[in-house]
């Protein structure tokens, strides 16, 4: 079921973050991911771009840009000019949140760092996303997702044993840093309700990636175990992984003795339960490769779809390994309504990912098409109190 929403703000006042104004200085992915979380839940997001941003027209028309920047309005503003900086500070005075992902030294040089903007608006929540943190020996290094995946340990545990480091197929450090930043912004806004004061919110690609190591990090921190590559096998719960069927591959997850027993019987391999190599979890882990071959042999007699049905009916977690197109054709995915549509005046009807969280009374909504550069400059400046002659002067001087 795909939700089609009109190009309107009629629902905005009903969304959880309606009434909040966010100034978006972000670029690339981590920052825009954070801001998209706010925009989809009703915040009025003003995306601030350089006046020559339309020179990026090719990437702007691509699915990546379009998916990241829905529900935003665009204002072009040259912050390197004194008049542009003065205009930005007038916006800050009435805003709730500023989000940026410059390198730490850049915002200080521009005069838009947190101390400078706090002096303009003590209630401002100022969120910063960087590659490695706002201070420390790597603070001035340029950040990039794959660099964080490597430095944060993820690439050392991804891929087949002995294959060499492998990056994850999505920019997971970028995405998680953006999600954590959005969470931090919401926490700061909640705390502001009590204190009346804003604060700085900071995260980095490196911190986000390390946090996402989760139990693999805990294995080292608490037991001194350094995880390695396990390929498609689960590092600790065996047999859990990818198994070959007559026509392809499926995922099977067996955690605990009871599910292991159900799985063996469901695939017609009950004899494995008496095999001394597999009688305990530790034994199955030690003999994981042999066990994998035995399971593959049992699965060779039927197609993937049949095994998925049979194993799930037996209470054994099992699922297909879908290509991206097959993901969106899956009946459960269609039922969940994971996409939303919005009409773009220039690009036509756009289909995008919807938020994966539902609120029963105030669900998220896609109400604005991804903006053209500066599409809303005049209306934004007017809403912030700029008079027509002031806007004309900014345009004349190339500030807007």
Image (cartoon, helix red, strand yellow):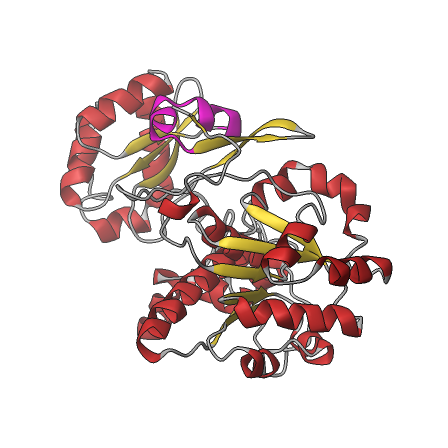
Q: Residue at x 62, y 60 (%)?
A: 26
In this orientation, which residue lies closer to the viewer: 303 or 342? 342
Find out whether residue 129 is within the magenta segment: no
Position of 83 relative to 269 (above/below)? below
Q: Residue at x 50, y 36 (%)?
A: 8
Can residue 130 be seen here? The reply is no
Q: Residue furthest right?
A: 397
Find out whether residue 337 is within the magenta segment: yes
Q: Residue at x 65, y 75 (%)?
A: 112
| 177 on left or right of 396 | left
Can residue 56 be seen here? The reply is yes
In this orientation, which residue lies closer to the viewer: 313 or 141? 141
Q: Quadrant of the N terminus?
A: top left
Specify start and end residues of the magenta stretch as a single range: 323-338
Q: Position of residue 77 (x, y in %)?
A: 73, 61
Q: Position of residue 109 (x, y in %)?
A: 73, 79
* Residue 261 found in image quarter: top left
Q: Position of residue 145 (x, y in %)?
A: 60, 58
Position of 209 relative to 13 (above/below)? below
* Residue 183 found in image quarter: bottom left
In this orientation, which residue lies closer to the viewer: 329 or 294? 329
Position of 122 relative to 79 (above/below)? below
Main SS of the magenta part reads helix
Q: Position of residue 201 (x, y in %)?
A: 48, 73
Q: Residue at x 62, y 54 (%)?
A: 380
In this orientation, which residue lies closer to the viewer: 271 or 241? 241
């Amino acid at each position: 079921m795909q939700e089609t929403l009109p190009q309107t703000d009629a629902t905005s006042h009903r969304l959880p973050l309606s009434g909040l104004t966010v100034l978006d200085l972000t670029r690339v992915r981590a920052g825009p991911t954070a801001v998209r979380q706010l925009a989809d839940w009703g915040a009025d997001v003003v995306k601030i771009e350089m006046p020559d941003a339309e020179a990026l027209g090719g990437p702007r028309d691509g699915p990546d840009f379009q998916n990241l920047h829905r529900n935003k309005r665009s204002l072009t503003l040259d912050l390197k000019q004194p008049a542009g900086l003065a205009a930005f500070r007038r916006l800050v005075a009435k805003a709730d949140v500023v989000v940026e992902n410059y390198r730490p030294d850049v915002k200080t040089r521009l005069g838009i760092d947190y101390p400078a903007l706090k002096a303009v608006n003590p209630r401002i929540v100022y969120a910063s996303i960087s590659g490695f943190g706002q201070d420390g020996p790597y603070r001035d290094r340029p950040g990039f997702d794959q660099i964080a995946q490597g430095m944060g340990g993820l690439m050392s545990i991804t891929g087949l044993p002995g294959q060499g480091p492998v990056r994850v197929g999505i920019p997971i450090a970028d995405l998680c840093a953006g999600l954590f930043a959005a969470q931090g912004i919401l926490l700061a806004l909640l705390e502001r309700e009590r204190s009346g004061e804003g604060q700085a919110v900071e995260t980095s690609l490196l911190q986000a990636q390390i946090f996402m190591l989760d139990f693999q990090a805990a294995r080292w921190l608490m037991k001194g175990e350094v995880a390695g590559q396990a390929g498609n096998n689960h590092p600790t719960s065996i047999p859990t992984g990818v198994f070959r069927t007559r026509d392809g591959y499926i995922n099977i997850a067996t955690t605990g003795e009871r599910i292991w027993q159900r799985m063996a019987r469901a695939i017609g391999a009950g004899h494995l339960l008496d095999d001394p190599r597999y009688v305990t979890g530790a034994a199955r882990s030690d003999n994981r490769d042999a066990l994998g071959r035995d399971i593959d042999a049992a699965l060779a007699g039927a197609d993937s779809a049949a095994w998925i049905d049979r194993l799930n009916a037996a209470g054994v977690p099992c699922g297909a390994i879908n290509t991206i197109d097959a993901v969106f054709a899956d009946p459960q995915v269609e039922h969940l309504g994971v996409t939303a549509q919005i009409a773009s005046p220039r690009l036509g009807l756009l289909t995008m990912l919807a938020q994966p969280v539902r609120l029963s009374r105030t669900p998220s909504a896609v109400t604005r098409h991804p903006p053209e550069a500066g599409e809303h400059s005049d209306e934004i400046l007017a809403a912030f109190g700029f008079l027509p002659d002031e806007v004309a002067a900014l345009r004349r001087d190339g500030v807007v």
